Image (cartoon, rainbow, N blue to C red):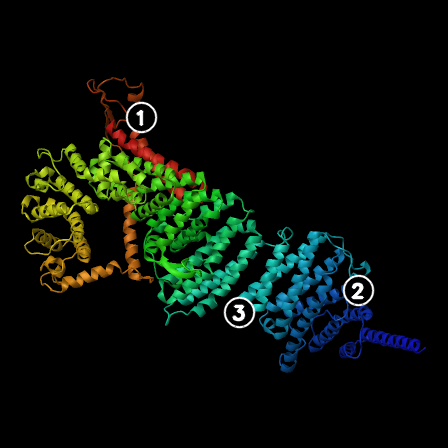
Amino acid sequence: MEADGGAAGEEAEERRRRSELGSLVEAIKSSEVLENRISLINQLEDPFQLCADDLGLVVESLIASWDDSTCSGVSHCMLHKSILQVALKCSELDTTNCLGPFLTLGSKAGSWCVRHLLWSVESIDESEDAQEEEHSRLFPEIIALTLNISSKHLPVASKCIAEDTVHAVGDFILELLTLTESSILDKKLGTTGHVAKAAPVFLDETIKLCRVYSEAAKSDQCIMSMPKEETTEEHKETDLTSNIAQITACTIQSLCKIGTHAASSGGSQVILLNISWKGIISLLQLGKGMVEEKVNVREIILIPISVAIESLRVATERWCVPLQEVLGTAEARRAFLPIKYFLTNAVRICSIYPSETMAIYKSIIRCALLISHSSILFCRNPQLKAASELLFELLEPSSFLLLDTLMKSTEVSPESKCQLVQYFLEKVRTGNPEYTGEVDHTMNFATLGCIFSVDSDVDNINRALLPAEFTVFLHFLNASPWLREEVVIELCKKLHLFLNILTLEDVYSYVLGCQIPALSSDDDSPKVVWQPVYTSLIQALKTFMIAASSSSAAWSEFEVFLLENLFHPHFLCLEILTELWCFFMHYAEAETSTYLINQLFLLLKTLASPEEVLAPLSALRKLARASCNILSYASSATIDQIYTMLNDSSSKSSILYLALLMEGFPFDSLSRGVKEHAVKTLFTSFAGYLQNQNYFKNHGEINLPTSSSLGIIGTSPDSSKNLLVKHISSILVIITHMRHLCAFSELEKLTLELHTLFMSSFDNSNTAISQCKPSMASFMAILGHLNTTEDDANPLCSAMWDLFHFLLRERHWALIHLAMGSFGYFAARTSFAQLWKFVPVDAALSYTCTGVDIDEDGFMSELKAFLQKEVALRDDKWSEEQICSLVSEGRMLKKLVESCLEIPLVPEPEKVSITNYVKTKKRKMPDGICEGMPENVSVTNDVETKKRKMPDRICEGMMLVQNGLKIMRSALSETDLAELKDRFAVHLSRLEDAVSHLASFSDKI
């Protein structure tokens, strides 16, 4: 009975509470006085203990009480605050059965708050500061309440994945996202505590909702969980997936705006920043296949990239002014960590949408170029060493990862990947007018503003970015082991152009004058070390060579590159090619290396000529020099084979053998039996060559170099004196290379003969003898290895003193350099103690600036300075003086290269006589040829030596063809179609060669 009585009492109490609640709700609805309505609504919050069954009635009254009109002042805002406080209290209960009304209330509140941001409160007098302040305090609280209530209902909405519910949720989220976005972007509201706390929570719940919806849409597990009668509006049946995609797209767009704003806040909104970008990436990943048509993925990718570039620009401009002290690691890290954060987000989005990213590959490349360029700028300034190392650790890997993401993706076609590679170095031509003139190598705001330009199409013609483009291309070479075969082949095709940009003074000075950070692999824990750019270049090319060798097609292209560029006119390019050849010879399989080295020596034989072999700067000697370096890495069997090939009976082989001897053929690497024979016949073969060339006519048999043949020059006619001196110089060069194979007595005898030659006074031969001074300087240096007794009575000692006196008196700057180098080498290795005897009192470097007075200590101080300069570049600091010198040197070398590559134009024909001498056969001129010949061409048809007419207007046509080729070459350099360039470049070169050949041929006809 007591239990029944208690239950009856509870029911009576519940009926009373429900009755009071109904009366209060009716009173709220009927109240017309704003202050009274606020008071009544407040009673819902405090005295009443609401339950889930009351929510429908209460929320309905709250919706009815909401005033959507323009804000009339503090009372209006107080009403809405009271409504939202009650709604927040109701949100603590189970709102599943009345989710629709809550969504309606939230939409109303969000819409009204957005409009409130645009309204001016006309009812409040601006002079009433107290009310103005109260109003300003209330509105952020209303926004925060709206967002907090919405955050409570989103988890409930995520469980109701029905078509009508999703549509209502979409409208609700759109209003609330607009409010959140507007509030955060507002300068006053965005920084208030209420909004700053509520906004991240709402955004986080929205992201979670979108995740659930997206997963449900993909899994097709959508259930109807909300009765139709509870929906606030009747909606036409729409596609559920489309609605979910729309919600996700709107959320992504709002998060992008909020994330961009948070990024520009200077770090004051880190929570919003992290939530925004984390949500963007998560929703883009889940929404792939649904949201692409509703959001612009390309623009989203560009947002973090643009922010990163702008942040880098600000940091670079701040540090490009002269600093009072060295930049600290902590400050550099503070500047770079946000940039790394945005680059990382860009990488994540790129990995999700590689095809969309490929459409903006120029912007991706531009980002990598700017980061590499900043790294180069920082490397130049010792005060920015910390910035350079941190940029290498934090930013460069992320920028390269953007490119690697495209290259690794299976969604990006091989053609597109090749297109990306083709874009590099595309507009670079050594003869391009854009690359002429002076370059400012100092950091300043004007150049930085141009470099950080928003126009990505300008970058490739910006000279300042050439070293950066060079650096990024090196990354592709290093990444080649995992690249597709098509891309590796495309990189092979770019190597010719890659070598050519080394001839530009900006890149030339960067490669030879700069050191950059790199990872050391010596220890278990890698650390940052500094190494020359040249070292990085060689390492990258070697890595690429290994990658190319795994593909027959790529290796064929690389073989062509190796062989063709051995004739490159620029010494640095030839040096790089030689390094690659040496690496190849050292590690390649015997069969492969033998085949390629045979091709190399076939090329050498085509250059062999008596005139070329004695010219140190001739193509033959340059290639022979490179070949000797290459052979030093070859196996003994390969060198034996080459030696055997050189010792056949042909004249070209003899010439080639001489060229190799003069450049240091690696006799030590020959097998024992072949080596003994080679040394035995070394000088007799050389003498035989000279006899065959009739250079020692009427002088009998010669036994070089130990005979007194050096005296021949005194009895030689003037016409052959210069040629004989060249051969004597060649002997000295060969012996310098072969000193370890020569007996002491032979070197002693040759030294005495040199002494006789140079100390004798024949007036007519002084000019000719002076040509031997460079080679004699090299020869004198190796005498430091002789173990000679230091004795005034020893004729060898006396000869050495006199010869060094002879060299050190020379006042020509180039010979001074050679003489100092020779004496420095000699002094460091000789057993002589009295070195002062080798230096004459009147040595060129003993004179003061007047050129008349002699300073006794002058020579030694100059020698010390010279030897110090030899090791002066072993430092990780970038010397501006050094760079300026390299730039000037690079500019001069570039002009030399351009002059070598110029195609001579055929002059305008005036009167051309075309004669063909035919002694064995007479041929009648074709009909019509004589009649059609221009008046300015005379044709002679002699009976004894028949002269053949050239076809009509040949010379004029030749000139037109050559000029046309120039126009085609110029037009091709301006086009953006890399594939077209590659296809035409080879054919144009062949055409130019053919036309040049025809031009010379026409003169002989």
Q: Earlier in the sequence, mark 3 or mark 1?
A: 3
Residue that carries the numbered disc 2 in the rendered image: 97
Q: Would you identify the image quadrant in which residue 45 lies? A: bottom right
Could you tell me residue 810's position as x and y percent?
Answer: 12, 54
On the image, which quarter does residue 93 sit in? bottom right
On screen, residue 108 above or below 237? below
Name which residue lies at 64% across and 60% down: 251
| Residue 267: numbered disc | 3
* Frontmost residue, 465 versus 156: 156
The number of callouts visible is: 3
Residue 894 lies, in percent from the top left, at 30, 49
Residue neighbourhood size for the residue with mark 3, other residues' Cα within 10 Å, grouped as few (<14), some (14–19), many (≥20): few
Q: Earlier in the sequence, mark 2 or mark 1?
A: 2
Extreme residue toward the right, this view: 1
| In contact (CB < 8 Å): disc 3 and disc 1 | no
Q: Residue furthest front?
A: 673
**Disc 3/disc 1 C-alpha distance (Å):** 79 Å
- Give, as a three-letter code, the residue at label 3: Gly
Q: Amino acid at mark 1?
A: Asp
Q: Would you name the residue on which mark 1 appears?
A: 952
**Nearer the camera: disc 2 or disc 1:** 2
Q: Answer whether residue 907 is visible to the viewer in this image.
A: no
Q: Earlier in the sequence, mark 2 or mark 3?
A: 2
